[in-house]
Image (cartoon, helix red, strand yellow):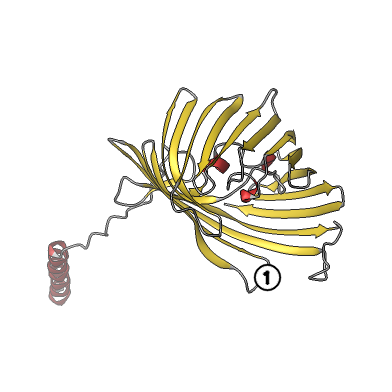
């Protein structure tokens, strides 16, 4: 009994000592985890950069398309009427609120190609804005002030797209907007020695918008004018139209070819929630007028298939575009 009592007493003493040592030992606390927080003040897809009050949005798309051209004379050089093309685009936006209004930056990286060897990534847009002031490298005001192109079509009209280094100010209130600015247009050739000036007004609401603008080409010393309208008279139906004219050759109409006018009309109708049909007609006085009709089919969220046919007097272009957006 004495031996048994001695062993039990020794064990109890050892447990008590080890318990005291364990209680005295420091316990390592886990590092607090900093989770990415959703930033819902600018819409879906935004999140806070950890440790800051700046919100970030990342998006873009991958696009592949094929066209088959039956117009007279097409294919005589390369030996084929068919052509592949692809594009990859990544959009990065950062935004936060300041005492002077929202501070925003926008970077768009893009790569285009038709052969596996010829794609190159470039900065397609770089824009900084604070309140109503914006500057950087962007699409020209001439292109973005109106409808860009009719109905989001592949062959979307003679509206004259270019990009430019720009500085502008926009005032907006109650659906009304007015913009003035200057820009150096990137035409791929020698640019003007001095910047071009532009201005425009816009009024819109849930029904659509109307806009008008004017631009001065400092190289040719000529003015160009444009007017645009997008109207949704009933649910699911959108009507669009633009008209542009110039006093003489300008970069804003026909790329300085000397065209006097261009115009276009079109419509888009949502047959179902994920399927719409569109058609358009566009003309420029120095170019071939054409009619185009197509479909936009959202197969699943994030995947769109777009077949389109462009019809001219001397033939057609059959086009298929597939876009995976995110």
Helix, strand or loop under label 1: loop
Q: Nearer the viewer, residue 97 or 109?
A: 109
Compared to residue 324, the image places residue 9 above or below, namely: below
Q: Kindly indicate the quadrant of the structure image that contains residue 12.
A: bottom left
Relative depth, front residue between 5 and 290: 290
Could you tell me which residue is drawn at 71 percent across and 40 percent down? 274
Tally the numbered discs.
1
Residue at the image point whose x is 76% and y is 54% from the top = 320
Judged left or right of residue 326, residue 237 is: right
Q: Position of residue 321 (x, y in %)?
A: 72, 54
Report x, y in % for residue 63: 65, 57
Q: Is residue 96 visible?
A: yes
Image quadrant assignment for residue 113: bottom right
- From this view, report whether residue 318 is shown above or below residue 11: above
Q: Is residue 301 left or right of residue 181?
A: right
Please say whether residue 106 is visible from this viewpoint: no
**Residue 88 coordinates in the image, percent (x, y):** 59, 60
Residue at the (61%, 42%) spot, across then down: 248
- The foreground one among 84 and 280 is 280
Seen as rendered, the residue at the extreme bottom is 3
The vertical placement of 119 against 310, above or below, is: below
Please state, as top left, top right, bottom left or bottom right, where the N terminus lies in the image. bottom left
Residue nearest the viewer, comparing 109 with 193: 193
* Residue corresponding to mark 1: 115
Q: Residues within 10 Å of mark 1 (few under 14, many from 20)?
A: few
- The percent coordinates of residue 86 (x first, y second) are 66, 62
Q: Residue at x 62, y 50 (%)?
A: 255
> Residue 256, relative to residue 109: is it above or below?
above
């Amino acid at each position: 009994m004495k031996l048994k009592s001695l062993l039990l007493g020794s064990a109890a003493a050892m447990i008590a000592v080890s318990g005291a040592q364990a209680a005295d030992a420091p316990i390592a606390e886990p590092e607090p985890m900093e989770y990415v927080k959703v930033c819902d003040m600018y819409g879906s897809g935004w999140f806070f950069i950890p440790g800051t009050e700046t919100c970030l949005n990342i998006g873009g798309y991958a696009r592949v398309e094929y066209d088959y051209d039956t117009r007279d004379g097409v294919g005589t050089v390369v030996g084929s009427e068919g052509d592949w093309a692809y594009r990859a685009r990544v959009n990065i936006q950062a935004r936060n609120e300041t005492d002077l209004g929202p501070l925003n930056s926008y970077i768009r990286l893009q790569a285009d190609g038709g052969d596996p060897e010829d794609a190159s990534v470039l900065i397609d847009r770089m824009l900084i804005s604070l309140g109503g002031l914006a500057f950087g490298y962007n699409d020209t005001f001439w292109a973005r002030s109106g409808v860009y192109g009719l109905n989001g079509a592949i062959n979307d009209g003679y509206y004259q797209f270019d990009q430019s280094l720009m500085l502008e100010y926009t005032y907006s209130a109650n659906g009304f907007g007015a913009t003035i600015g200057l820009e150096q247009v990137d035409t791929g050739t020698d640019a003007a020695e001095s910047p071009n000036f532009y201005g425009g007004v816009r009024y819109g609401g849930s029904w659509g918008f109307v806009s008008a603008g004017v631009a001065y080409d400092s190289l040719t010393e000529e003015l160009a004018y444009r007017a645009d309208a997008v109207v949704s008279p009933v649910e699911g139906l959108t009507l669009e139209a633009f008209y542009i004219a110039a006093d003489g050759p300008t970069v804003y109409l026909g790329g300085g070819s000397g065209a006097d006018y261009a115009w276009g009309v079109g419509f888009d109708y949502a047959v179902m929630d994920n399927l719409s049909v569109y058609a358009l007609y566009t003309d420029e006085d120095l170019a071939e007028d054409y009619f185009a009709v197509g479909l936009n089919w959202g197969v699943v969220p994030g995947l769109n298939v777009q077949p389109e046919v462009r019809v001219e007097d001397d033939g057609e272009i059959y086009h298929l575009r597939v876009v995976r957006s995110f």
